[in-house]
Amino acid sequence: MAEESKKYISQEKLSTHNKPGDLWISIQGKIYNVSDWANHHPGGELPLLSLAGQDVTDAFVAYHPGSAWQHLDQFFTGFHLEDYSVSEVSKDYRKLVNEFTKMGLFENSGHSVHFYLFLVAMLFTLSIYGVLCSDSGWVHLGSGVLMGFLWIQSGWLGHDSGHYQIIRSKRVNRFAQILTGNCLAGISIAWWKRNHNAHHIAVNSLEFDPDLQHMPFFAVNSKLFNSLASYYYDRKMNFDAFTRFMVSYQHWTFYPVMCLARINLFAQSFLLLSSKRLRVKNRIQEIFGLLVFWIWYPLLVSYLPNWGERVMFVVASFSVTGIQHVQFCLNHFSSSVYVGTPTGNDWCENQTKGSLDIICHPWMDWFHGGLQFQIEHHLFPRLPRGNLRKVAPLVKELCKKHKLLYTSVSFYKANELTVGMLRKAALQARDLASPVPKNLVWEAVHSVG
């Protein structure tokens, strides 16, 4: 009788509740209205907007600890999803989540955050000491290199803290976020979390994943030539004459642009924190952290003896950090992409198709910051990076059993695949059937004499 008294709605009806102010989701067949919760959601409103109107059980399981389930009842509409069923791959995936929970793998015991914080402090100290206490240009160059490695390690800590609490105390954890992200690296942790959560939920969607939206510099697929809409930036990605020119040579400009990619992160941080349209939690705190960076870094550079060494220091620090920007691209640029809204009922399929692992020895884990296990990380984003290597064999078994794509290549091969993909799209952009419209840049490059 209890089963008969349940109220049901169809998937078609559920899918209509997918707009701001009208956001419904299904979790294990129960329908929840999260319209008002979107503005308070710790992961931001974008994940809810991207997956609204669908069953999101696997995504919920991936991102939330067991304690989150007790809060769902307040959003329950009284409806259940008609003909709700669970795929075999989802059943096995959820079993793995339960097993990892019982094994304590989601607890932050996988890597020593204190060691990495100490490493960041040492790199910071050595870089400053080299600038202030030496007259050697070579030492100043080395200090710039150390600053770049400092930013890489602080980036890994920021990435980790965006997914799980790296320090038990929430206040100390927040302090570590602002210190390593905003103060030391000049990157807003609020921007990072907003951008990265959108990426994870919509991995390799050309319209929803901000990590694939890099025009006018890069287009990872010819589908972007259709001037698609970006639902992250809320604007059209115009494939105009200048963009086509830049994309036509993207396989040559990839590494040079990566050396300067940090400038984009600075800009995106400022744009978010200065936006009146977007809600930013702890905005003043975030702005203060950025101000700290923009005081100490220019001041440190000013202590160098001449403009030549100052430029050398900045270029060295930016270029070294470019390694990390390349790493971010390797994991996704050459993987499968699609146009359209991300879906929640094929979570495992989307995460494995859109990600790529890097084969490396354990002693190189510090260099990759956990991103070498990108498939594992995307399936289990709350897993501390030190535990990703432990679960990799189980993830491979899951993929093999359900015939999911599992791509794992060397660091060199990943670079080769990425550049090859960029070259393919570049040649398509140059297609003589639709020649590049001339502009001032085109004329300047091809002028004679």
Image (spheres, rainbow, N blue to C red):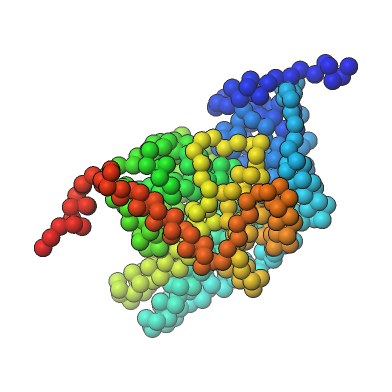
Residue 413: where, in percent of width, then height?
A: 52, 65
Nearest the viewer among 131 and 408 is 408
Task: Name the residue rendered at 49%, 38% in the picture.
Answer: 339
Residue 225: where, in percent of width, then height?
A: 37, 42
Left or right for 439, reference 270: left
Nearest the viewer among 298 and 318 is 318
Q: Quadrant of residue 55?
A: top right
Count of all numbered marks drawn on residues in the image:
0
Asked if residue 440 can be seen in this view, the reply is: yes
Q: Quadrant of the N terminus?
A: top right
Task: Name the residue rendered at 61%, 44% in the picture.
Answer: 350
- In the depicted structure, whether residue 236 falls above or below residue 257: above
Left or right for 58, reference 355: right
Nearest the viewer among 365 and 68 is 365
Residue 157: where, in percent of width, then height?
A: 60, 60
Asked if residue 68 can be seen in this view, the reply is: no
Q: Quadrant of residue 111?
A: bottom right
Task: Name the residue rendered at 47%, 36% in the picture.
Answer: 231
Task: Name the residue rendered at 53%, 51% in the picture.
Answer: 335
- In the depicted structure, whether residue 164 falls above or below residue 67: below
Q: Quadrant of residue 316?
A: bottom left
Residue 178: where, in percent of width, then height?
A: 56, 55
Q: Residue furthest right?
A: 1
Q: Residue furthest front?
A: 433
